[in-house]
């Protein structure tokens, strides 16, 4: 099974919570806050051509009370992971055998690869749509600066007309964003629902006020930004009477670069023979 790209995870945060500008050499203090954000979003949608670096790393994932530790390797054909532990405990011999079989089966199944690639493309398209809405969905203001980053706060833009269900979620959020001052890349974003979000008057569900999300990123290699943390805490109701509670956290650490031409078969071999040792 593949795992999503960091940009897809950013989109997932917005989903769970329910004009293009060229690069500029101006400093943020010389730009209106809204224009800085547009430039940042442009750079996220059009990263440098040499920034596509592939990594292996460790993921600590907590989702609805379940805690997993995974090793992940990115390849030119997608990402592959190996489950290392559940609730901090290593897998049993039987579970290790099943996990190894799953990895080998996926790495050798071209149909599974095709389906995973289709899903990845769909996720990326959805993510791009989310990112494109951000400059128009919020009103931004400068709120501080340190040696490397600029802080902005955001609140709902009353003039924004959401084109989708996800846009309705954005329309009810407020929070803060940190951007890298020099590169104009997203460092972190923290948001909270300031109002309930109702879909079709509440018949198709709603998200409760106070739902939160956090995304943090870091420059792991020169001009290559990767997600290091995703946290989502949301409550609501979906499909009339089904209560939902999403509490999810992912922390990504231990980044190590792998060859750009790595295949899924190569990744499977590394996961089965090397990664467990490398990531301990």
Image: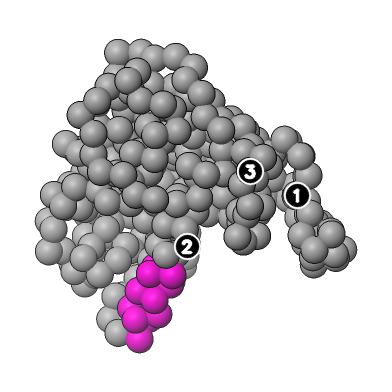
The kind of secondary structure the magenta stretch mainly shows is: helix
Locate residue 280, reporting x and y percent.
32, 41
237 sits left or right of 1 in the view: right
| Residues under numbered marks 2 and 1 in contact, where contact means CB atoms less than 8 Å apart | no
x then y, percent, for residue 102: 39, 73
Of labels 2 and 1, earlier in sequence is: 2
Q: Secondary structure at mark 3?
A: loop
- Of circles 3 and 1, the one toward us is 3
Vertical relation: 135 (above or below) 176: below
Q: Is residue 221 above or below residue 110?
A: above
Q: Residue at x 48, y 38 (%)?
A: 215
> In which quarter of the view is residue 26 placed?
top left
Q: What separation in Å lies between label 3 and label 1 (alpha carbons)?
A: 17 Å
The percent position of residue 183, horizontal first and vertical second, equals 25, 32
Per the rendering, the mark at residue 126 is 2
Res. 23 image quadrant: top left
Disc sitting over residue 159 in the figure? 3
- Left or right? Give the position of 25 relative to 175: left
Which of these two is toward me, 130 or 141? 141
Q: Secondary structure at mark 2?
A: helix
Choose the circle earlier in sequence order: 3 or 1.
3
Report the residue marked by disc 1.
197
Q: Nearer the viewer, residue 83 or 191?
A: 191
- Image quarter of residue 220: top left
Q: Residue at x 35, y 25 (%)?
A: 31
The answer to whether the residues at label 3 and label 1 have Cβ atoms under 8 Å apart is: no
In-image side of 153 versus 76 (left or right): right
Mark 2: give few (<14), some (14-19) or many (20+) Cα within 10 Å. some
Specify start and end residues of the magenta stretch as a single range: 111-122
Quarter of the image that includes the N terminus? bottom left
């Amino acid at each position: 099974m593949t795992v999503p790209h960091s940009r897809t995870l950013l989109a997932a945060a917005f989903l769970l919570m329910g004009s293009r500008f060229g690069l500029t050499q101006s400093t943020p203090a010389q730009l209106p806050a809204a224009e800085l954000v547009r430039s940042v979003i442009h750079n996220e949608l059009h990263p440098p051509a040499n920034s596509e670096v592939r990594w292996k790393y460790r993921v600590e994932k907590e989702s609805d009370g379940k805690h997993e530790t995974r090793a992940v390797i990115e390849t030119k054909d997608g990402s592959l992971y190996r489950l290392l532990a559940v609730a901090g405990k290593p897998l049993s011999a039987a579970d290790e055998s099943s996990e190894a079989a799953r990895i080998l089966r996926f790495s050798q199944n071209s149909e599974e690869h095709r389906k995973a690639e289709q899903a990845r493309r769909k996720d990326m398209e959805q993510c791009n749509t989310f990112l494109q809405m951000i400059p128009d969905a919020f009103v931004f203001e400068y709120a501080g600066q340190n040696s490397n980053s600029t802080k902005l706060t955001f609140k709902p833009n009353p003039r924004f007309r959401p084109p989708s269900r996800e846009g309705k979620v954005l329309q009810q959020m407020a929070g803060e964003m940190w951007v890298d001052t020099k590169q104009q890349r997203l460092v972190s974003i923290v948001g909270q629902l300031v109002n309930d979000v109702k879909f079709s008057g509440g018949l198709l569900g709603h998200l409760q006020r106070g739902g939160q999300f956090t995304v943090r990123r870091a420059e792991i290699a020169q001009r290559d930004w990767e997600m290091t943390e995703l946290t989502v805490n949301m409550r609501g109701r979906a499909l009339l009477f089904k209560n939902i509670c999403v509490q999810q956290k992912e922390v990504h650490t231990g980044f190590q670069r792998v060859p750009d031409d790595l295949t899924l078969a190569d990744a499977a071999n590394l996961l089965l023979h090397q990664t467990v040792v490398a990531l301990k």
